[in-house]
Structure formats: structure tokens, C-alpha cells
Image: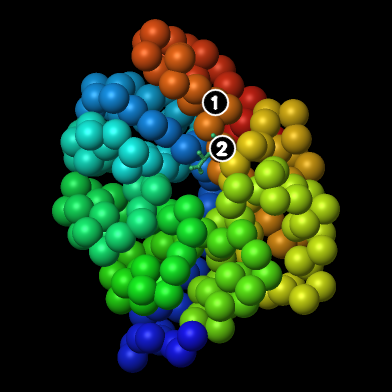
Amino acid sequence: MERPMKDDALFEASQQAAIALLRATRVLPVVTVESAEQGVATARALLEGGLTAIEVTLRTPAALDAIAAIRQHVPGIALGAGTVVSERHIAAARTAGATFLVTPGTPPALAHALVACGLPVVPGAATPSELIALSSIGFRVAKLFPAAAIGGIALIRALQGPLADLLLCPTGGITETDASTYLAQKNVVAVGGSWMVPRAWIEQGNFAAVTDASRKASAL
Ligand code: 3PG
């Protein structure tokens, strides 16, 4: 893939911003909510537990409203939209107030749209070829997804040689137990996961459990 952007300096700055926010949180909670209220309460619980970023997946009808409500009521959290798979998602997430974007996979048209959008972005990839394609465009960080299913720690170690310059945010199947092993890898800047925000806790309003699990996650 060719580099799609004229202003490389801006794109580089947005990638550095993505790395900085991942480095600050170390654990990126992947949150799926059924209402704006659930989104706000979850964001507050995460922040109270010491996690400084949230990825709200665009998988439910309430996701965009939740992003808008979190923007308004929990301004202290870095607010991302996840499961971004189209240009329409990019525009809608930005309008709702998302300040960074995460994709589960990144076909060429989506990669170009991500570069052009100017926001900090973490593009998803699962194979060396996909990672090389992203790197050749100028991406500095990628979400390795679904990390556990495609090889986990062994895959990440194997990528350290040929793709030493690309930072990874492995996500998918990571647990409280193995998150620290992922984080110890030199090409891992952060891990993503939903173990501190299971849908059952959110639906039951058990935000004390979210804060508790976030406290443990932020101490990793
Ligand atoms: C994602 O979209 O990143 C995943 O659903 C998160 O994976 P997990 O639920 O296995 O942590």
C-alpha cells in the first residue's frame, strides 16, 4: 500500500498520540453498553479504578449516545470508539465525541480513511502481512486481534524480530491472569480486554466490581 497522506507530520503526530494514550493506560477496557447511562457509569467506575481510557464498541444501538454522554459527563477519560469498520463509523464516532479510534481489522480503504481522519487511531491486524501493510503506510501501533486465538504470547515474541518497530496492543481473549505476561513483551505498549467490564456486571449495575477489577488491572 502507498502512503495515502500528504501531510505525514500530522499523521505521525496522531500516531504518537495514540501510543501515548495507550502507554498511559496500559490496559484498554473494551466496553459494550446498552444505554448512555451504562456508558457513563462504566467510564466513572474505570476512572475510579485508575484506568485512564475507554474503548466503547460500536456494536450496540446505544454506542454513539454513550460516547456523547461520556464526553459530557466524564471528561477526564480518554474516549475511544471501537469496532470501527467503515468511513461512516469514523464520522459518526468523531461527531459523538470520540477522541481516538480502534478497528478490529484494517482493509486498505479503511486504513486510508483512518489516516485521513487525523485522530489517533489503533488499526487492527492479525497477520504479518497485515502488520507490514500498516507499517508501510506509516502506522506505528496496531491492535493485534484476536490475540489469544491467533497465537498469543508466542506470536508476539515471534513478531519482535521481523517487525521490531511496530508496537502492539494485543486484544481478544486476554485475562486478568495473563495480561501481565503480555505487558512484559517489549513490542507490547498496552493490552485491550473486557475482563474488567463484563456485560453481566454492567447490566446488573455492579460498577463496584468494575472499579475493583480496574484497580487490579491498573496495578499490572
Ligand atoms: C474486542 O473487540 O477488542 C474484543 O471483543 C475484546 O476481547 P475480549 O472480550 O476477549 O477481551
Left or right of residue 26, residue 122 in this image: left
- The answer to whether mark 1 is within 8 Å of ligand 1 is no
Image vertical order of residue 79 relative to residue 142, above or below? above
Q: Is residue 163 visible?
A: yes
Left or right of residue 71, residue 191 in this image: right
Image vertical order of residue 124 relative to residue 160, above or below? above
Secondary structure type for disc 2: strand
Residue 196: image tag = 1
Q: Residue at x 32, y 72 (%)?
A: 113
Picture colour scheme: rainbow
Q: Residue at x 75, y 50 (%)?
A: 151
Question: Foreground: 172 or 71?
Answer: 172
Whether tag 2 and tag 1 are in contact, CB under 8 A, the answer is: yes
Image vertical order of residue 114 relative to residue 79, above or below? below
| Residue type at tag 2 | Gly
* Pointer 2 residue: 193
- The answer to whether mark 2 is within 8 Å of ligand 1 is yes
Residue 32 found in image quarter: top left
Secondary structure type for disc 1: loop
| Residue type at tag 1 | Met
